[in-house]
């Protein structure tokens, strides 16, 4: 996570801040060797991770907006530096960021940098899925469709508990070798972030309009699509400059 902050929308308090504090306490009392094992990280990183937990605070002066704190290919596609304050306010009402530590975050919820992925186990032996149960799903509407742009690791903590229609776009790239649509992980991650940004900046309210997405070279493929999984295919991915990783493939 990075420590940048932008925009002028006031910080809000995470809805599961009490649960986050409980998770922090579990790790504060855990030695570095155990943390390294649980998180499957190198010895060179574990010291910094432990320091994050040891100095964690929920005080307003220590917080940054959640949307400014995350890094990775999906967040590269979000391009939050291009967002206006109106975009942030709209996202605050419609976007939920799934988080291991905080459960579910609104973009302007104040958070501290942390490391806790949903696939980790806790020092007391529980999985993150055991800890969160169905609580994160309570943040989502039961009356309106849910646009799912998260990694499978995180949706496993939510989708089993929702009854609303779930729409999960799929992003494919034409292979220069075979000429066939192929799944390219880095492309798809950036595309999911770009899709969320497009929905937010255009304030898309009707799911029938989702097929109009044409960012990064993608176009809707009707033949390959279903109502629950619209498929977007690009002949030449144009998001290579958005991620350090994607410039290397």
Image (tube, rainbow, N blue to C red):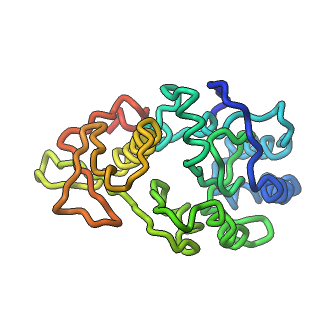
Residue 62 position in % (x across, y down): 81, 33
Query: In this view of the protein, which residue sits in the foreground, 143 or 240?
Result: 143
Position in image of residue 35 (x %, y %): 74, 56
Q: Quadrant of the C terminus?
A: top left
User: For residue 241, what is the image quadrant?
Assistant: top left
Please give left or right for residue 14 compared with residue 81 in the image: right
Q: Residue at x 45, y 57 (%)?
A: 147
Residue 75: % across, % down: 50, 40
Residue 182, given in percent of the width and then of the height, sits at 23, 55
The quarter holding residue 156 reads: bottom right
Name the residue rendered at 61%, 42% in the picture.
92
Asked if residue 62 can be seen in this view, the reply is yes
Q: Does residue 101 appear to the left or right of 21 in the view shown? A: left
Is the residue 13 above or below the residue 238 in the image?
A: below
Q: Quadrant of the N terminus?
A: top right
Q: Residue at x 23, y 51 (%)?
A: 220
Please name whichever residue, 37 or 24, is drawn nearer the observer in this view of the structure.
24
Foreground pick, 66 / 44? 66
Residue at 56% across, 42% down = 91
């Amino acid at each position: 996570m990075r420590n940048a902050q932008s925009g002028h929308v006031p910080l809000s308090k995470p809805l599961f801040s009490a649960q986050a504090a409980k998770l922090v306490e579990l790790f504060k009392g855990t030695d570095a060797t155990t943390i390294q094992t649980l998180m499957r990280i190198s010895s060179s990183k574990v010291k910094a991770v432990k320091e994050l937990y040891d100095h964690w605070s929920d005080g307003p002066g220590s917080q940054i907006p959640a949307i400014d704190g995350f890094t990775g290919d999906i967040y590269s596609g979000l391009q939050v530096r291009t967002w206006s304050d109106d975009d942030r306010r709209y996202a605050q009402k419609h976007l939920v960021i799934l988080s291991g530590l905080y459960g579910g975050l609104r973009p302007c919820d104040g958070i501290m940098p942390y490391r806790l992925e949903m696939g980790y186990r806790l020092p007391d032996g529980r999985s993150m899925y055991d800890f969160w149960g169905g609580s994160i799903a309570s943040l989502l509407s039961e009356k309106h469709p849910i646009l799912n742009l998260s990694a499978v690791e995180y949706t496993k903590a939510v989708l089993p508990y929702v009854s609303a229609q779930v729409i999960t776009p799929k992003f494919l790239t034409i292979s220069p070798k075979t000429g066939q649509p192929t799944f390219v992980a880095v492309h798809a991650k950036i595309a999911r972030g770009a899709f969320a940004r497009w929905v937010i900046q255009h304030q898309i309210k009707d799911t029938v309009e989702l097929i109009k997405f044409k960012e990064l070279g993608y176009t809707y493929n009707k033949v390959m699509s279903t109502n629950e999984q619209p498929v977007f295919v690009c002949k030449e991915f144009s998001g290579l400059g958005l991620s350090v990783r994607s410039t290397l493939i």
